Amino acid sequence: MERQQKQQIINDLKKKMVFITGPRQVGKTWLAKDIARLFPGSVYLNYDSAGDRRIIKDEAWLENTTLLVLDELHKMNGWKNYLKGIYDTKPADMMILVTGSARLEAFRQQGDSLAGRFFRHRLLPFSPAEAVHVNVPVDPDFFLSRGGFPEPFLTDSSIDADRWRMQYVDGLIRTDILDFERIHDFKAIQLILDLLRSRTGSPISYQSIAEDVSISPNTVKKYIQILESLFIIFKVTPYSRNIARSVLKTPKIYFYDTGMIKGDEGAVFENLAALCLLKHVYAQVDLEGKPASLHYIRTKDGAEVDFCLVQDNTPELMIEVKRSEARPTRALLNFNKRYDIPAAQLVLHLKRERMDNGVRICKGMKYLESLLL
């Protein structure tokens, strides 16, 4: 299945370096090699390979290389200065594509030695919008049960999908987490991950999790930050500007792999919606250069709206996600009337779309298909 971002990446390669980041096994290497096949004279080098590592360190690729693909380069000491030197001295017609997961994204945020030299593309799991774009039928039940990671999404066997997920979670914990940072209490981070799987979409209390796991709240916060850095979970933070009493600071947690959710159909659909909205926001930022962000709204008195799409610090659309409830929630109606923010309620099982007191009642999957990515 061709990735929707492919052509934009090819266009960007002709202007600057391109970084492809994203979760483990989301298809970054596959996409990089797929692009490389379009350019005669391309070279793919993986820093994990001893032979490739020597070529990288010696800069021993041919002078007529058209596209240089560097995978896992962030494992090389001083990789940013290395890339800066390569980019600043390369032949004018040579393109550079760099791929990696957590550390590439984390290290990219430190310092600015590569400022102005690259475009970033965050590759996330398949979404209904991406499936529609590449002419793949969207089956709501399939998306909810399989998630959008390529291997479980594309396999014909649900058993193989389950086996992949079991190995994926085990690999994240036993390999990626320990590789990213030394954890003193390995069991604690496993327990935190398991707790988060059953608390998707709820504001996270570090204190409550700390009591459940018997560690300090600061340690809980640190471990959740590691899970976020590794593209296992993502946070949706509260929006408060111009919203009276919206002072709750705690984030809500969602997973990149909807198949990891321990909850009913409604919880899984909310996570899928969160992931699709995040992907839409990333596309606005990475592809269009817009200052977009994803938040939620919750006031001290408990009024809450699941999501709020924000553009340049101004809310553009409030979104509530429901399994089957077609009547707009009280909070959605109140915020819509009081602050004049457009509002929509996405319903997974809905017979007919309509307007209800200024709120769009939408078929959930149909709306997700309409997003940018």
Image (tube, rainbow, N blue to C red):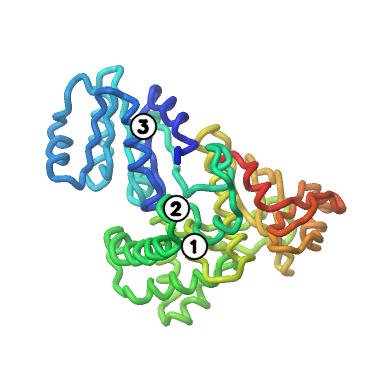
Q: Identify the element where label 1 is drawn.
A: helix
Give residue 149's mark.
2
Is the residue under label 2 in contact with that under label 1 (CB below 8 Å)? yes
Alpha carbon separation for disc pair 1 and 3: 29 Å
Query: Is residue 222 among the parts visible in the rendering?
Result: no
Name the one closer to the observer, 36 or 222.
36
User: Which residue is denoted by mark 1 in the rendering?
Assistant: 259
> Which residue is tagged 3?
35
What's the amino acid at mark 3? Answer: Ile
Q: Residue furthest front?
A: 156
Of residues 339 and 173, the one drawn nearer to the viewer in this rendering: 173
Count of marks overlaid on the render: 3
Who comes first in sequence, dot 3 or dot 2?
3
Residue 4, horizontal then vertical, whole percent = 49, 36
On the image, the x and y values in percent for residue 103 come to: 33, 50
Q: CA distance from mark 3 to mark 2?
A: 19 Å
Residue 201 place in picture, x, y as percent? 59, 65
Q: Is residue 351 above or below residue 86?
A: below
Residue at x 67%, y 51% (from the top left corner): 308
| Image location (x, y in percent) of residue 340 | 81, 47
Q: Is residue 134 left or right of residue 232?
A: right
